[in-house]
Image: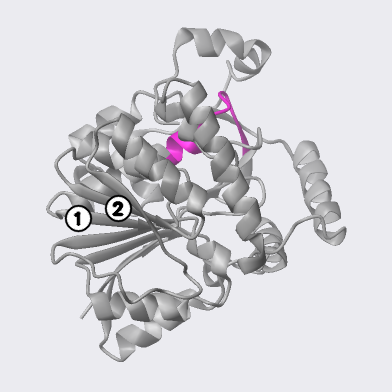
Amino acid sequence: MGVSVGLAELEENGQRHLECAQSVSELSVSDFAKLIGESVSHIGLDTQDFLRRFDFRYSPVESEEKEGLVLKILKNLDSRKFSTVGPQRYGIWNSAWEKTSQRFSQDNHSGEALTPDFLDAHPVVRLHREFIRPCVPSFEGNVFSVLRHWLFQQYFSSIQSIYEFGCGSGFNLVALAEMFPNKTLVGLDWAQSSVDLVNKIGAVKALRLTGRKFDFFSPGHDLELETSSAVLTVCALEQIGKEYQPFIDFLCDQKPQVCIHVEPIYELYDEDNLLDYLAMRYHSDRGYLMEFFPYLQKLEADKKIKIIKVKRMYFGSLYHEGYTCVIWKPL
């Protein structure tokens, strides 16, 4: 994720590329601006240039194929195929980041080796509450890369220290370091293998990056954020279900200048829409983040925080939308 799509990649995908040759749509700068709820004038030229590096052509999924996909999702949901989130998954995540660390070493410390396996896992993704078939398999990850680039430019440019909680493989921190080499970056995760990996990345790439242990389920109060700081979570809070309050209260006490969460938000779905309903079923079955956004709204009503932006992108993977942006700051 985060690299342009070249001729070799298009040729490698052969038939898939040919099938998309007559694509009716392509994600443009204007389209991206609508996805994040901004005007084109609020998309910096750097981000616009970054977006143009990718092949964002796609074809709509026709009704017959859509019916088959819906049936597949329903069968998987009814079979209870999906595991639920929670502290019992520590071993799974610790093992996952150990494997990523090995891949990182074997691949000459390539940033691409840090891309989590769950990105671009399906050849069909969601856009505007419809299924689409991208021309290249990295479409989902590339959209996220552009979103990430815009968020970092928009909200982190004047911040000195940035903390990513639930940082996993550290791939977001590497992207941050490439954009802002002089900022202090801290990656926090409950899995020791993630902490070790982040420290390895910082050492081998000579970055201002360190890893530190942190448990969402039991936030340590020995951590003090720097004065000019920002907080980031990306598909990390989803893993704690309804156990978000200790972490949010921790942030309110620490008072960073801005908190950005890129997460699936259950309350923004519409249960009367078929694809939204399927996403709600999936979200609920996995035990993902619940009642988080209403809690932030309550804190705002109590004048404890200010919600800066909430934007559902209407974009996601086969099963749900994981890229809603919730941006706020403590008062």
| Residue located at (44% from left, 42% from top) | 197
Q: Specify whether residue 119 is in view.
A: no
Write the residue at 40% across / 58% down. Answer: 233
Colour logic = one colour
Q: Name which of mark 2 and mark 1 comes first in the sequence.
A: 1
Residue 94 placed where, x, y %? 58, 51
The disc placed on residue 191 is: none
* Contact check, label 2 and label 1, Cβ < 8 Å: yes
Please state which of residues 297 and 131 is positioned toward the viewer in this rendering: 297
138 to the left or right of 227: right
Segment colored magenta: 132-144
The quarter of the rendered structure image containing the N terminus is top left
- Tell me the kind of residue under disc 2: Val
Percent coordinates x, y for residue 82 in the rendering: 76, 56
Judged from this view, the residue extending furthest toward the bottom is 302
> What residue is at 25 percent from the left and 75 percent from the top?
254
State the image quarter where residue 5 is shown.
top left
- Residue identified by numbered label 2: 186
**Which labelled disc corresponds to residue 161?**
1
Secondary structure beneath label 1 = strand
Residue 88, picture quadrant: bottom right
Is residue 50 part of the magenta span, yes or no?
A: no
